[in-house]
């Protein structure tokens, strides 16, 4: 049996360097700094400053924007944990977007309030510029400039909630254009790793899809994402010399009963393609409508191939092989359907 000797906690100097000179009372106490020394150092003209309850800046100059973020996070974290771990709190909203470097969001120097997300059961109050936001879901953190931030989709949703509730946050020109730019940047920036599906889920969870400006921007974004994916399917069809499909036809039975509107359809083979169908669905009603159409096609013998934009981008050859195989096999006892092109 091997034993692992625990490493000693970092010294005050190491901790201060790691946390940009911002520390908590419990961190100071753990390193043998008495409360009376802290009080003396924080008096007028002293070398330290008190930024928030139980959070101190180990310098006499005012805090930088990054130090303000550290202070907010350490204030909201559980007991100011050692080793720079900040369990129980993540920065979200406008401050998180500024840390991520969103061009559509205010610069970090212009952020006047810091939203910090904590578990619902935490007993914590707003303090200074720190606004406490509670969630019943498990916290997920991403390290951004050493700070624990909410994932991009959650940060975007919280920022939009604040902007739409306040009309316009300081330094933010709220409006449809801003909403479009933020959503587009969240999905298209490669360094933040946010998918359109994650964004839809967060905006739906927050109730923002009921806001006309948000819903319009979201619909525009999803339509653009699906257009790109459908263009890639067309490139695969051409590269594999497959027959040209019908684009977005309406399928009905001979009696006129509506069946579905697949993205692509080969009537001779009885094969349909659905690309990123979840991006067509924002509400539960839309999801049920799309899934119902897919189920009806399959019930009537149509072979439905489900593709994702991510797979089309990553492995188009595998998609081409799958489509060729589907066309060779075709549907199974397909009921004769009326096809209307638009």
Image: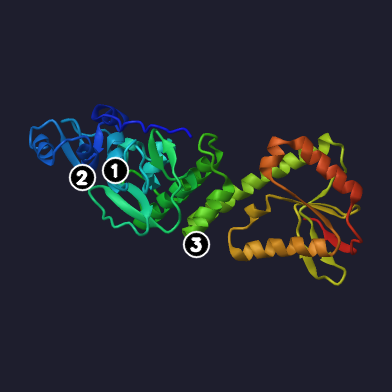
Checking the image for residue 210, the label placed there is 3
Image position, residue 77 (x, y; %):
32, 46
CA separation in Å, label 1 and label 2: 9 Å
Q: Going 50% across and 62% down the picture, which residue do you hit?
A: 210
Whole-angstrom CA distance, mark 1 to mark 3, is: 38 Å
Q: Secondary structure at mark 2?
A: loop
Residue 185 in the image: above or below residue 253:
above
Q: Residue at x 20, y 45 (%)?
A: 54
Count neighbours of disc 1 (C-alpha within 10 A) and say few if under 14, some if 14 to 19, many if 20 or more. Answer: many
Which residue has dot 1 on it? 80
Using the image, tell me which numbered label, if any, was put on residue 54. Answer: 2
Q: CA distance from mark 3 to mark 2?
A: 40 Å
Label 1 vs 3, first from the N-terminus: 1
Which callout, 1 or 2, points at the residue further toward the start of the chain?
2
Is the residue marked by circle 3 packed among few (<14), some (14-19), or many (20+) residues within 10 Å? few
Residue at image position (11%, 36%) is: 37
* Quarter of the image with the C terminus in it: bottom right
């Amino acid at each position: 049996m091997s034993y692992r000797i625990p490493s000693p906690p970092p010294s005050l100097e190491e901790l201060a360097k790691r946390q940009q000179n911002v520390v908590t009372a419990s961190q100071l106490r753990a390193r043998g700094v008495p409360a009376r020394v802290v009080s003396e150092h924080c008096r007028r003209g002293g070398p330290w400053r008190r930024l928030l309850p139980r959070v101190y800046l180990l310098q006499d100059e005012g805090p930088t924007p990054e130090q303000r973020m550290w202070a907010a996070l350490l204030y909201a974290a559980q007991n100011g944990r050692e080793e720079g771990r900040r369990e129980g709190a993540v920065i979200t909203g406008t401050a998180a977007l500024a840390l991520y470097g969103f061009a559509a969001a205010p610069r970090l120097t212009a952020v006047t309030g810091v939203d910090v997300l904590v578990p619902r059961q935490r007993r914590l109050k707003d303090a200074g510029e720190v606004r406490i936001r509670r969630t019943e879901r498990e916290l997920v953190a991403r390290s951004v400039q050493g700070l624990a931030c909410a994932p991009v989709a959650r940060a975007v949703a919280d920022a939009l909630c604040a902007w739409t509730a306040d009309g316009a946050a300081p330094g933010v020109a709220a409006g449809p254009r801003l909403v479009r730019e933020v959503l587009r940047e969240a999905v298209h920036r490669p360094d933040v790793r946010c998918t359109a599906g994650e964004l839809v889920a967060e905006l739906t969870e927050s109730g923002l899809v009921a806001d006309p400006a948000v819903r319009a921007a979201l619909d525009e974004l999803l339509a653009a994402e699906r257009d790109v994916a459908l263009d890639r399917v067309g490139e695969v069809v051409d590269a594999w010399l497959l027959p040209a499909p019908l684009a977005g036809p309406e399928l009905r039975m001979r009696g006129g009963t509506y069946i579905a509107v697949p993205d692509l359809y080969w009537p001779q083979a009885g094969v349909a393609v659905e690309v990123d169908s979840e991006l067509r669905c924002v509400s539960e009603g839309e999801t049920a409508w799309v899934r119902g159409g897919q189920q009806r096609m399959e019930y009537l013998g149509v072979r439905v191939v489900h593709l994702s934009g991510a797979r089309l981008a990553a492995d188009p050859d595998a998609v081409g092989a799958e489509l060729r195989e589907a066309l060779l096999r075709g549907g199974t006892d397909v009921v004769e359907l009326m096809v209307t092109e638009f």
